[in-house]
Every structure is written in structure tokens, then in C-alpha cells.
Amino acid sequence: MMKYRIPGLARISSLVLLISISLYSQAQDIPTDPASISAGEALFKLNCKTCHKVKEKSVGPALAGIEKRAPSIDWINNWVKNSAKVIASGDAYAVKIYEENGKSQMTAFTSLKDDQILSILAYVKSEAEKVEVAATTPAGGAQGGEQGGVPSSYLTVIMVGLLIVLILLLVVLGFIVSGLKRFLGQKELSEEDREVVDSGYTFGGLLQSKGFLFVVAFVVIAIGFKTVIDGLYTIGVQKGYQPKQPIAFSHKIHAGQYDIDCKYCHTGVTKGKSANIPSPNICMNCHSQIRTGTNTGEGEIAKIYAAVQNNKPIEWVRIHNLPDLAYFNHQQHVVVGNIECQKCHGPVQEMDVVKQYSLLTMGWCIDCHRKTDVNSKGNAYYDKLEEVHQAQIKSGKKDKGNMKVEDIGGLECGKCHY
């Protein structure tokens, strides 16, 4: 039996096999474990979210399916770390992306490691594969806007209560007087006594009566006292403070419309005490390409260019001011406490001009420490504290419930006043 051999078939088969292995290997390089996806989400929000979305085009292209469109994972690594170098090399795909996006050059992320970029790809792939489901819960407002009520509210309740008591006393006295009149009307009285009993009430007489004057004096004094107390409690409280800024920067557009993560601009929140006001260099990461504002045209963005060219800082007006005697650390709350910015600063993504949303008073902070649960899961630092907390519950010293911030020293004076 004759055997026919098709020329090149073995070579074609080998090539197909190599391509399949290459594609399979490339797909396998992207991790799928929850830890990598979670790490990738944090990195995406910090570095990529400003210009990219997963399923929609933003400043840059949508990232869904990038692992399939790009030539290789190594190519993606090189592009992320230095896109200008890849474009300059004449790479056809790199040049194509560059031209399709208005020749906007991507920021070089030289500090990102290969495994971090893989984590970002894992997050993007995970998000791209999710099926969009219509939200079933109503959109809620920002949290924590009114925690820790103003103490003077208790005075209002007391005043209203006292006024109600006074009115009830007057009603009771009226019934007593009416009953006494009916009782005395059946008795034999002298002319003088009869005249007193039969005398009626006049409006002028009511205004001149001691009882009426006492009620008026009490109300005036109570209102004055409450006004003074309210004034004392508002010393140093700047809730609603909304100064005009040197540049008409809109958080509603940046944090709302373009969904830029707060930590991208305010880099200090994850590293130390202060959140940091972004320098013009951070602004220029985007505005080196974007020169026309949504609401203000070119005038406001031109002020950023002027600050960079003249090497002068932008003199932003500070909004949130704490007294020097109080210590507050953003890193402790944002990183350790995992608190969202909106918890204290309100819905900044809806504000064209930012204002102080919360009271930021001592009582407001203490109230939060009393109500906030400590997330101790997976953190060995809290193991001993959790044991102590459970022991106090068993001994009856504490009610059943999760461990609060106050249970781990959140109300100690030295924590905030040092």
C-alpha cells in the first residue's frame, strides 16, 4: 500500500501546536485566585482608573480582553512600564494604539513589578467576565454625615417639655379656678367677696397678671439661654464651610463623571497623617493632553500650566481644619480601618465646590468610635484583644456584640491629644 505524504503538513501542525501552546501559556500566566484579583483591584484603582475603564472607553481604551488583543504578556509589561519606548521601537500594535487614542501618551509606571501588572490583568479579566445585573438596592447617600448630634438639641427637647408642662399647669389652674367659682357661687358671701367671685377675665387684665408675665419672662430667658449655648457649641465648628478656590476644580467631574479614585490625587491618605493636596505634576498626568475643561474651557487649565511653567505652587484654600491639639492620621483610618473617604467628607463626587460635610468635633469622633466595629478577621494583631473582649462579655462587664473601636483604646485621651 502506498503512503502519500503531504509536503509541509508536519511543519504546519507543529506551528499550530506552538501557537496553541503559546496562547494557552499566555492565558495561564494571568492568576485567578481571589488574593491576586483583590490586589489587582487596589492597584487598578490607584494607577489605572484615572484613564481607563474595564468595559468602556474613557481617556484611554477599555481594558477588557487586553490579554487577548496584545501580542503577549511581556508586551503588556513593557507597554505599562514605558509605552514611549515601545512606540519608538516601531512596534506596529503600539503605534496603532497610539494613533487611535489621539496620540495621547500613557504615563510610564516604572515602579510596577511584573507580578503586580499580572494582578491588574487578573482583576480586569474578572470584571470583564462578570454579567451586569441591574441594581436591586436603592442608591444610598453618603454615610456618616450627621453622626454625633449637637448637644444643644437636648436643650431644645428640654425647652419644649417645660413649655408643655407650663401649658398643662395653666389648664389645670383654669379648671381649679372654674371649680372654685362654682363652689363659692353656691355659698352666701359678702358683697365684696361676691364681686371678686363674679369678676370675669379681660384681655388687659390677663396681660398685666403676674402669671402671664412670668411665662413670658421664662420663655424669653430660655430662648436666650439656648442661643448662648448654641453659640458656644459652634465655636470652631466649620460645617458647611465652602471657600472659593484659586482654580475652579470640580470634584463632580473628576471623582463623579470620570470616576477618578480619591487616592490617585490625594496620595498621602495611605501613607501618613495628611492626605496631601495634589501637586500640579499630578494634574499634568492628564492635562498634558486634556487642555479644555468641561465647564470652564481653557482658562482654568491654563492656570495649572502657569503654575508649572513659573514653578509656583497653586495656593489652594484649606477646607478641613482641626485644632492643633488634636491628632488625626489618615493612614490609620483609610488603610487599617478601611473607611471610605465619603464617610467623613460626604459625597464629594457630587460637589462642584467641596465643602466641609461633617462636624469634625470631638463628640462626632467619639460617637463614631463607639459605633464602629473593628474588623479583626485574618489579623493576628487583634487576637489577644478579641480574647479580652469575649472574656468581658462572659463576665458580664460588656454586652454581647462585636468589638468596637472604643474597646481597643479608641476613647483614650492620649490617642488624639498628645
Image (tube, grey):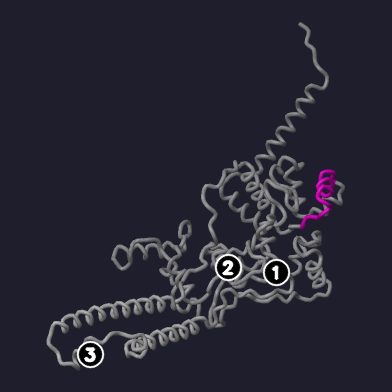
User: Which quadrant of the figure has residue 66?
Assistant: top right
Mark 1, mark 3: which one is toward the viewer?
A: 3
Task: Where is residue 241? Give x, y as percent.
Answer: 61, 75
For label 3, count other residues whose C-alpha is less than 10 Å away and answer few (under 14), some (14-19) or many (20+). Answer: few
Q: Which region is colored magenta?
A: 91-107
* Label 2 with label 1: CB-CB less than 8 Å: no
| Residue farthest to the bottom, as pictured | 192
In-front residue for pair 15/105: 105
Is residue 97 in the magenta section?
Answer: yes
Q: Which residue: 36% across, 85% down?
A: 203
Read off the residue under disc 1. 278
Left or right of 341 in this view: 233: left
Which label sits on residue 196? 3
Q: What element carries label 2?
A: helix
* Label 1 with label 3: CB-CB less than 8 Å: no
Q: Is residue 195 above or below residue 381?
A: below
Read off the residue under disc 2. 345
Q: Which sits earlier in the primary sequence, circle 2 or circle 1?
A: 1
Q: Is residue 19 above or below residue 118?
A: above
Task: Where is residue 352? Give x, y as percent.
Answer: 67, 66
Mark 2, mark 3: which one is toward the viewer?
A: 3
Q: Is mark 3 on a helix, strand or loop?
A: helix
* Amino acid at dot 2: His
* Amino acid at dot 1: Pro
Q: Which sits earlier in the primary sequence, circle 2 or circle 3?
A: 3
Q: Which residue: 46% across, 75% down?
A: 150
* Amino acid at dot 3: Val
Q: Distance between the residues labelled 1 and 3?
A: 82 Å
Q: How far apart are marks 2 and 1 (CA)?
A: 17 Å
